[in-house]
Amino acid sequence: MTEESAGGLVVRGQEVLMIRDRFGRWTFPKGHLEPGETARQAAAREVLEETGVRAAISARLGRVEYALPGGNSKKITFYLMRFEGGELAPLHAEISEARWFTFDAAQEQLRAYGYPGYRVMLRRARELSARWPQA
């Protein structure tokens, strides 16, 4: 069985939003698709629910796939998202913390404690968001 999830790398200036999951790892907001929901819809919903941040999808970054215990697998589609507003308000039932990191600091967190493929998503987000017009 394959679990389908979607998430977002929310960028605000030169920072990216990360969450600390229930396993103590810094990662990106993500979650399962609900019935009838697209990956884009799920990514936007999960970012808002988990962090309190509103963000608009700018581009699809790619997909991360990995095996889960018990023989199942997980596929996560990630999107680059531009911060639109809101205050950080972590959903403590699912995550312990939400924080803005510089791209370099986020890369260090992922290098030390990250999940497979997430550093590639961060690198793509950094490259694509660097092309955005500066406000």
Image: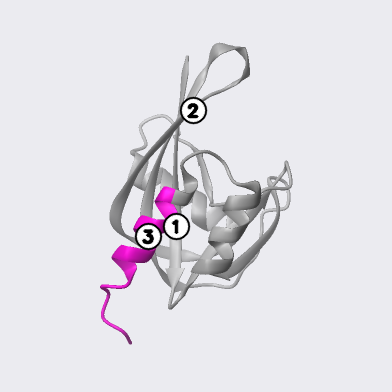
| Nearer the camera: disc 1 or disc 2 | 2
Q: How many marks?
A: 3
Q: How crowded is mark 2: few (under 14 residues within 10 Å), some or many (20 or more)?
A: few
Q: Does the magenta stretch include residue 130?
A: yes
Please give the name of the residue rendered at 27% of the width and 75% of the height, measured from the top-left corner. Answer: 132
**Disc 3 to disc 1: CB gap under 8 Å:** yes
The residue under label 2 is: 66
Image quadrant in which you'd find residue 115: top right
**Disc 3 to disc 2: CB gap under 8 Å:** no
Quick check: 115 left or right of 7?
A: right
The residue under label 1 is: 9
Identity, as a three-letter code, of the amino acid under mark 3: Ala
Please give the name of the residue rendered at 33% of the width and 87% of the height, measured from the top-left corner. Answer: 135
Q: Nearer the viewer, residue 129 or 92?
A: 129
Identity, as a three-letter code, of the amino acid under mark 1: Leu
Mark 1 element type: strand
Mark 3 element type: helix
Q: Earlier in the sequence, mark 3 or mark 1?
A: 1
Compared with 39, 46 (above or below) is below
In the rendered structure, find residue 87 and report the number of the disc placed on it: none
The residue under label 3 is: 125
Magenta-drawn segment: 120-135
Question: Disc 3 to disc 2, how far (Cα)?
Answer: 20 Å
Q: In the image, residue 126 lies at what x, y percent?
A: 38, 65
